[in-house]
């Protein structure tokens, strides 16, 4: 019995020993060595998995942001698009700045929109939309220098776009950068020669620089394309008037009246120019045209009377001047015209009689002129001039002694026939 147990124990010990040896041998056996290529492959795989995950997150946020943007759920757009900005390491979604900026505008947050556009330009400096949008924002905030810089980039990146050139040209004009503004509007005129507004603006810029030849050339170009352009016709009229080139000014005033025959200011201006150039009959004709629609205009009546006076028709001149006084009591300029008619009558009568000095009848005529000047003194608009004219007559007025010596003489006397028209 004992021998069996001993044998069993010995066999058990052998098995245990063999098992221990097996564990020791295999447990201490060297592990298989991993190569560098295997390690690189493992790294690439890990990176690929990370990239897949990142790409998934990026596209997911872009998709969610854009879907909300299309649906005008602007408050929900912002976090998704900012996540796109954060995750987009390879700049595959640069349009996110455009959409995010627009989103902030829709939310009434222009400050945030500006910040987005400025940030986006750091990543994509040649983006036309971002530069244009910033230009608009800067201009609206009176940041003119920054706005100009933005629009200058825009017109370089996308030349020939009308709205951008207008924006830039307007900014140049606002900052009085006339030469650059001229360059922009020249380009606009070349692009749209039929747009006379651009040509008009360009003329205004030339005028500011004092380039009168360019101004006239531009105005003539406008009138050639649009003969009825009243503003250009007036501009040319004013230019020639300022240069005292009356014939040319008269030509363009007549063109204005062809376009608008009822233009009262043009008609008055034309009559005045004829009068200035001693074309009194033409002046009278123009005043007559005005008086058809404004028969009681004291100023026009007086100007017409003055024109008749210059032609030597003193009777007609006084008659019309008196009509002016009936139309407007106390209109002193009409009294002045009458007084000057009387003074001219003295000159005429002396010339006709062949005398150089003033006789008593001449002095009586001068006295009538002085009385008219005295009436004109009541009109404050011309009182100073009336006083000067009246005072100038003082030396030729009849004295007390003259009146004593000639107390029975009057301008209605047969001997004073030259003056009879004055007392009628």
Image: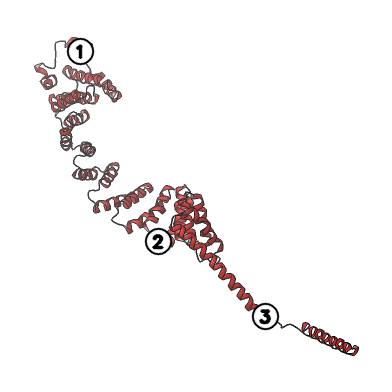
Residue 409 placed where, x, y %? 14, 13
Q: Is residue 148 visible?
A: no
Mark 2 and mark 3: Cα distance apart in space = 55 Å
- Badge 2 marks a residue whose secondary structure is loop
Q: How is the image coloured?
A: secondary structure
Task: Give whichever of 16, 105 is nearer the camera.
Answer: 16
Total marks drawn?
Answer: 3
Q: Is residue 62 left or right of residue 281?
A: right
Q: SS of the residue at dot 1?
A: helix
First reached walking from the N terminus: tag 1 or tag 2: 2
> Going 67% across and 80% down the picture, which residue do you hit?
36
Question: Which circle, 1 or 2, is nearer the viewer?
Answer: 2
> Is residue 365 visible in this depiction of the protein?
yes
Residues tagged 2 and 3 counted as in contact (Cβ below 8 A): no
Q: Position of residue 271 (x, y in %)?
A: 20, 37
Query: What label sits on residue 159 in the rendered view?
Result: 2
Left or right of residue 194: residue 261: left
Position of residue 206 relative to residue 406, above or below, is below
Disc nearer the start of the sequence (2/3): 3
The disc, 1 or 3, on the residue closer to the chain's N-terminal end is 3
Residue, far front: 1
Quadrant of residue 324 within the rendered picture: top left
Q: Residue furthest right?
A: 2
Give the camera-side residue of 369 and 405: 369
Nearest to the eye among marks 2 and 3: give it: 3
Please give the residue where the numbered disc 3 appears in the rendered image.
36
Residue 230's x, y, as percent?
25, 45
Q: Tag 3, which secondary structure?
A: helix
The residue pinned by badge 1 equals: 402
Which is in the foreground here, disc 1 or disc 3?
A: 3
Front-most of residues 82 and 161: 82
């Amino acid at each position: 019995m004992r021998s069996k147990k001993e044998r069993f124990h010995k066999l058990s010990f052998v098995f245990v020993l063999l098992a221990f040896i097996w564990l020791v041998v295999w447990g201490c056996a060297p592990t298989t060595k991993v190569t560098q290529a295997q390690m690189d492959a493992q790294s690439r795989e890990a990176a690929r998995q990370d990239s897949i995950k990142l790409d998934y997150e990026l596209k997911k946020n872009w998709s969610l942001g854009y879907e909300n943007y299309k649906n005008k759920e602007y408050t929900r757009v912002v976090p998704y698009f900012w996540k796109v900005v954060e995750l987009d390491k390879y700049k595959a979604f640069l349009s996110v700045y455009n959409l995010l900026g627009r989103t902030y505008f829709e939310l009434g947050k222009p400050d945030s929109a500006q910040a987005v556009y400025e940030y986006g330009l750091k990543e994509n400096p040649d983006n036309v939309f971002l530069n244009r949008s910033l230009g608009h924002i800067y201009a609206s905030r009176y940041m003119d220098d920054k706005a100009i810089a933005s629009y200058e980039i825009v017109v370089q990146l996308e030349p020939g776009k009308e709205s951008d050139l207008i924006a830039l040209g307007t900014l140049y004009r606002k900052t009085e950068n006339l030469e650059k503004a001229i360059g922009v509007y020249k380009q606009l005129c070349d692009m749209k020669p039929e747009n006379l507004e651009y040509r008009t603006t360009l003329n205004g810029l030339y005028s500011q620089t004092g380039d009168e030849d360019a101004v006239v050339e531009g105005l003539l170009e406008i009138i050639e394309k649009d003969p009825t352009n009243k503003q250009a016709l007036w501009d040319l009229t004013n230019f020639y008037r300022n240069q005292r080139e009356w014939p040319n000014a008269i030509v363009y005033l007549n063109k204005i009246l062809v376009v608008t025959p009822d233009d009262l200011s043009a008609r008055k201006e034309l009559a005045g120019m004829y009068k200035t150039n001693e074309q009194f009959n033409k002046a009278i004709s123009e005043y007559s045209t005005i008086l058809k629609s404004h028969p009681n205009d004291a100023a026009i009546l007086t100007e017409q009377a003055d024109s008749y006076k210059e032609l030597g028709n003193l009777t007609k001149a006084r008659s019309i001047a008196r009509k002016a006084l009936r139309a407007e009591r106390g209109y002193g300029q009409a009294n002045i015209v009458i007084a000057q008619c009387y003074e001219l009558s003295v000159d005429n009568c002396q010339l006709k009689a062949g005398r150089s000095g003033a006789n008593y009848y001449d002095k009586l005529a001068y006295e009538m002129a002085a009385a008219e000047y005295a009436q004109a003194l009541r009109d404050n608009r011309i009182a100073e001039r009336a006083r000067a004219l009246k005072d100038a007559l003082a030396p030729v007025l009849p004295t007390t002694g003259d009146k004593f010596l000639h107390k029975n003489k009057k301008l209605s006397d047969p001997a004073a026939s030259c003056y009879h028209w004055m007392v009628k």
